[in-house]
Image (tube, grey):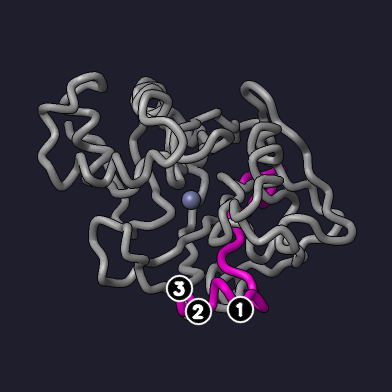
Amino acid sequence: MLDLEVTPLKLATMELPEFHPEAPGLDTVYGFLVRDQDACVLVDTGVGMGSELIDRLYTPDRVELSSALAEAGASQDDITAVVNSHLHFDHCGNNSAFPGVPIYVRQAELEAAKEPHYTVPEWVWFPEARYVPVEGGHRISSRLELLSTPGHTPGHQSLVVRSGRHVDLIVAQAAYTAQEFSAFQRAGLSQPDEMDSTLQAYVESNATWSETAYRSSLACLHGSQPRRAFFSHDSTVWTREV
Ligand SMILES: [Zn+2]
């Protein structure tokens, strides 16, 4: 069977806020286009427009979603489904470009997003928004499956792409960097002492909801024996060490 195409889309660059382990510096936001025979799925929609607070805190430099899709050989009309890994502002900012298109989000994340300061509410709730609340594992198409990976947020999810006999993962923000993802593969998941302090700082800053859940989610992701893994904030594509 043919490999499925996973195309990272660079959607924005932002200035890192103070609390980030690598601040000051820049953070890049990626979405992903996944094309299957029966689906064309966009994972995450980047940073939206019109929030004075976000513009002031992060000074985002956005790539037009339509341009990013065009560069990948697709258009907004091709998208049959949207997946939000979670509903922080830099992952759902252009959801409104997809009225009536099913947007797969975990129920727990829809609940979390109602809390104050969680996200930019108007980027989540817009007229004709068609959220499909997901609980448990959920197949979007024959070879695309959503996996619950809480930790960064209560309702974070990743996408399992079964490509030929391989598994590719859109980890999204269940790990912040490929390096961190690798460290979990090597060290096992309950041995934080074996992680160096830089990686430990990443985990602590990224596991904003639950570090225990974060570690379990990474165990679960590695348990799928992935060939490759893609991240929301790191352009490095992780590949299995053989
Ligand atoms: Zn986030």
**Disc 2 crowd, CA 10 A, few/some/many (<14, 14-19, 20+):** few
**Residue 168, image x and y in percent?**
43, 38
Mark 3: amino acid: Tyr
Q: Nearer the viewer, residue 200 or 73?
A: 200
The residue indicated by pointer 2 is: 56
Q: Quadrant of residue 210?
A: top left
Magenta stretch bounds: 35-59
* Residue drawn at point x = 58 percent, y = 60 percent: 89
Q: Is residue 218 magenta?
A: no
- Disc 1 is placed on an element classified as helix
Q: Secondary structure at mark 2?
A: helix
Residue that mark 1 sits on = 52
Q: Give the CA separation, mark 3 to mark 1.
A: 10 Å
Residue at the spot of label 3? 58
Give the spatial CA distance, label 3 vs label 2. 6 Å
C-alpha span from label 1 to label 2 = 6 Å
- Residue 35 image offset from top left, x and y in percent: 60, 50
Does residue 41 appear to the left or right of 157 in the view shown? right
As for residue 54 lying within the magenta part, the answer is: yes
What crowding class fits label 1: few (fewer than 14 Cα within 10 Å), some (14-19), or many (20 or more)?
Answer: few
